[in-house]
Amino acid sequence: MSKIKIWLKAIRAPFFQAAAIPATVGAVVAWREGVFHLGLFLLTLVGVVCINGGTNLVNDYYDHLSRDDDITKNITPFSGGSRVIQEGLLSAREVYAGALPFFAVALLIGFYLGLTRGVPVLILGALGLFVGYFYTASPLKLGYRGVGELLVGVTLGPLAVLGSYYVQAQRFSLGSFWASLPIGLLVAGILYINEFPDYEPDKAVGKNHLIVRLGPERAVGGYYVILALTYLTIIVGALWGIMPMLALIALVTTPIAVKAAGVARVHHSEPQKLIPAMASTIVLHLSVGLLICLGYILDKLL
């Protein structure tokens, strides 16, 4: 495997949608309101992706130090880390060092946008970087304390969407905040469902996220709640006029959510059979995010 492919595997590049979608949603909401700067959007996109890439590397490093990823046996394409350390493709030191340029670029972009668009951008970016780094890093280890899902949902939901919107519009709005809620919920849902296969190793190292605290069978109910709230926020937002009615187009993804929930209900303790639900949650995040964007675009054009 080439070095480039190894690093793409390490940073989990295919999952950068978790950062790209909220940045896009924020910019599209601003565009609908008559404000859009392509260069600033691209800078924002690079910034949030860099935070995401650095976070993935730091998490791999600290999950190796705790031996969490090392003792994981139920490996899936969506859980258990990137495995580059465990497979001997990169050393732990290389992985940690690799995170630093990502965070450095994110900081430089954050300072630039903070100076040119407003201090709130810098504050939101700094909060995102803080949560990303200390999700598994000592001494905070936020992901070990039962608040990881909430923090990730907030960071890659409201913080990222509002940050992207502010870069464009230089203000906050209820509409941009509301549009961020289904995005944040589904990001939290991705993390949540991906934690099921890691239940045993996470429990062994004291990574007491919600799946460990509740147990896989009881935790399925939390997955149902996340999916239900996702669609509820879209419906309420459209009916109250906070989002355009055309955003309801995102409801066409409901059958995917229902099927994923059914898989989780039956196979919550069978990692390999849970993979379709994990994949579907990622598809939901991507499709709901893009369809919400489409709803905003069509609302302006029509």
Image (cartoon, helix red, strand yellow):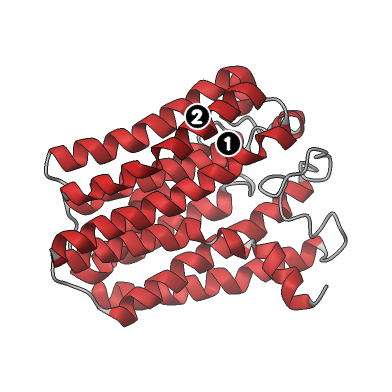
For marks 2 and 1, the one nearer the N-term is 1
Q: Quadrant of the N terminus?
A: bottom right
Q: CA distance from mark 2 to mark 1?
A: 7 Å
The residue that appears at 71% across and 50% down in the rendered structure is 81
Point out residue 29 in the picture as x, y percentages from the top left corner.
23, 61
The residue that appears at 62% across and 45% down in the rendered structure is 139
Q: Quadrant of the C terminus?
A: bottom left
Q: Secondary structure at mark 1?
A: helix
Q: Which mark is residue 193?
A: 1
- Residue at the right extreme of this rendering: 88
Q: Nearer the viewer, residue 79 or 254?
A: 254
Side of 267 where 74 appears, left or right = right
Q: Nearer the viewer, residue 125 or 212?
A: 212
Number of numbered discs on residues? 2
Point out residue 63 in the picture as x, y percentages from the top left corner.
72, 47
Point out residue 75 in the picture as x, y percentages from the top left corner.
77, 43
Q: Is residue 29 above or below residue 238?
A: below
Residue 245 seen: yes
Q: Amino acid at mark 1?
A: Ile
Report if the CB atoms under discs 2 and 1 are less than 8 Å apart: yes
Q: Which mark is residue 223?
A: 2
Q: Secondary structure at mark 2?
A: helix
The residue that appears at 45% across and 65% down in the rendered structure is 48
The residue that appears at 70% across and 25% down in the rendered structure is 269
Q: Which mark is residue 44?
A: none
Q: Amino acid at mark 2?
A: Tyr
Q: Nearer the viewer, residue 13 or 115?
A: 13
Local packing at callout 2 (Cα closer than 10 Å; few below 14, some 14-19, many 20+) is many
Point out residue 159 in the picture as x, y percentages from the top left corner.
35, 53
- Residue at the bottom extreme of this rendering: 39
